Image (cartoon, coloured by chain):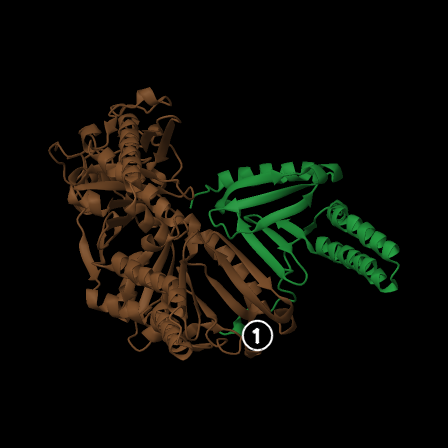
Amino acid sequence: MTEQSPVTSGAPPVQSEPAEGPDAITGWRRMHPITPALKGWRIVVAVVTIVVIQSDNLREAVDLRHGKAWLLVLGVLAVVALVGFAYSSLAWRVTRFAVTDEAVHLRTGVLFRQQRQARLDRLQAVDVVQPLLARLVGLSELKIETAGGDGSGVSLAFLREADAEVLRSELLALAAGLQRPTSVPTASAPISTDVPPAAAVAQAPAPAPFDAAPEREVYELPMGRLIVATLRSGAVPALVLAVAGIVVAVVASRDIGALFYMLPALFAGAAFVWNRVNQGANFRAAISPDGIRLRHGLTENRAQTVPPGRVQAIRLSQTPLWRRKDWWRVEINVAGYGQGSESQRDTVLHPVATRAEAMTALWLVLPDLGVEDPVALVDAALDSTGDDAGFTGAPRSARWVDPIGWRRHGFRVTERALVTRSGRFWRQVDVVPHERTQSLGIEQGVVQRKFGLASFVLHSTPGPVSPRVEHLGAAVAAALLDEQSARARTARATATPEQWMRAVGVPTGTADAPPEPST
Amino acid sequence: MTSDAFPVSREPFDPSDVIWTPVSRKLIGARLTVAAIVLVPLLLVTGVIAVAAGEPWLWTLPAAVVLLGLWISWLVRRQVGAMAYAERADDLLVRRGIMLRSLVVVPYGRMQYVDVNAGPLARRFGIATVQLHTAAPATSAAINGLPPQEAARLRDRMASRGEARLAGL
């Protein structure tokens, strides 16, 4: 479906065929000249951090300041900074990128040259990131995520803010299967993304290759709610308890020393709160023809664009202290974002959603849940237990394996997706569209076998969502496995193509059908 | 939809429409060799200690090692007996385990790449391992103990089927 090479289409040979050699690609561009200044600092900061961490004894450092040794330290720092900036400038000189109709090319490396080519139809997400320093000088980094695992994406740092945004629209339009307006002859009407597909109008050749897709804001997170929610999330009450315990211990033992053992925990807690607030601040979500657009960050600005069909799975989760407010955290699996601590800030669709917003977030990803009343379905998934509301729950015998949460284990299959629910106090609901199923499995331990139970597992791409339904009846789990693999197969056959604009019948110039003559 | 609506199959890990191919029994030999490499020196050391010290209770150590060896050989036999795979029209089924049983269904269209591995010991026993990879790292679909020809056939078959079904994401 999506695999045939665009070169084989009926498009006239105006677009130069990208040959294999890098010399055939024209339009190599450099990053912004300030880049080395911004990147050089990272080396200095890294060295200083290592030195500070290594000299674990603070007194040692204080002693150094009394002697002449601090001059030496300053000198070493200056040399490090010089080397850092020199290396960054060298790296900047050899770094180039080019965008063709099929791929993004990036050449990097001073000693070890690297040429990376990322196919645009395999693009998973495009992020525009502005770290604090870059933001002050009006630069941003453009990140193109592909599904090749950690570090597989292409990072273009740094570009002028406006350039980065133009490039983003260009990449997304090309990835969607639209054709560059300038390279399209009059035979097929050039379409820019902000024109509704039905009303395709021929445009005069514009200097900008693609207009930015129009977007409509869907929700916004108030700062107050974010702070309250962060303070009510699991880690903070635990930290407060720990602090109270240590204070009691200090008072009881009349030894101030215990306070120092508390410091690492305090730092960790503060870092957690700061990260949550920093990443979730100014969180806004919008929808555009390019996909879901997420903007967030206090010090570091991130604008993520996840094209349609790139979200592999969705999770709504709630901690006990959020229950009364009915707040939910919405997270997604996107193949490009991978795993690890870094991905935590990328894979959040809504840090603190009310129930209505959670439903909106779900709708952003899956406009059609495949049921008549999606609101009732989501309500049921969030609240129901047992076999209520069309869900299939765990049988009574599961209470011997999981006495607390057994009623919440359950699933419901709709025409479009599998909805699983679990957790009595830490509630969780996962939704996986059938066509995004990677592989499936069932598992059974010794105890489960004794009670005729089995767990159903759905494997999704790396990310925060890993759906599984524990302790189903063994026969139910086996039947679900069988039916779900059949459903995934049929859903895949009709899934949206990776060049998503081709799904809505926009003449993209690369389609199989010859372009219609314009009027 | 209650649980009654599902057809009750006799055994969840043994769907009725599937013909399982067991893995090669040579895998037992390979796994027992690995166990022997660890256990035989241990047996010798404990035996020598028991003889040298002359304390009768020290003989419990080599006895324990022997018991462990017997238990492992019984377990390995059963484990290898439980390993099987089945090729269906659109997906591959991999089954394993007795205590902790699992069954994985990997659609051909989801296969990203296939690995065939054979270590020195496995080569001596004439077996290889085929590992299927999807975009999900959790997919644990490895088939141990395949004869090399069968492994190569399976690999080629997977590759061609994956291609025919347009492996994407």
Expressed as whole percent of the image width and height from the top left, the position of residue A337 reads: 37, 48
Expressed as whole percent of the image width and height from the top left, the position of residue A79 reads: 29, 33
Q: At 31% across and 39% down in the image, what residue appears?
A: A43
* Left or right side of A128 for A149: right
For this rendering, which residue is in front, A75 or A221? Answer: A75
Q: At 83% across and 61% down in the image, what residue appears?
A: B58
Instruction: Residue under label 1, please give it.
Output: A401
Q: Colour of chain B?
A: green
Question: Considering only vertical position in the picture, is A229 above or below A271?
Answer: below
Expressed as whole percent of the image width and height from the top left, the position of residue A490 reads: 45, 52
For this rendering, which residue is in front, A505 or B132? Answer: B132
Q: Amino acid at mark 1?
A: Val
Residue A97 visible at all: no
Q: At 41% across and 51% down in the image, what residue appears?
A: A340
Question: Considering only vertical position in the picture, is B94 above or below A39?
Answer: below
Q: Colour of chain A?
A: brown
Q: Say which quarter of the image contains residue A515.
A: top left
Question: SS for tag 1?
Answer: loop
* Left or right side of A184 for A316: right
Q: Chain of mark 1?
A: A
For this rendering, which residue is in front, A269 or A250? Answer: A250
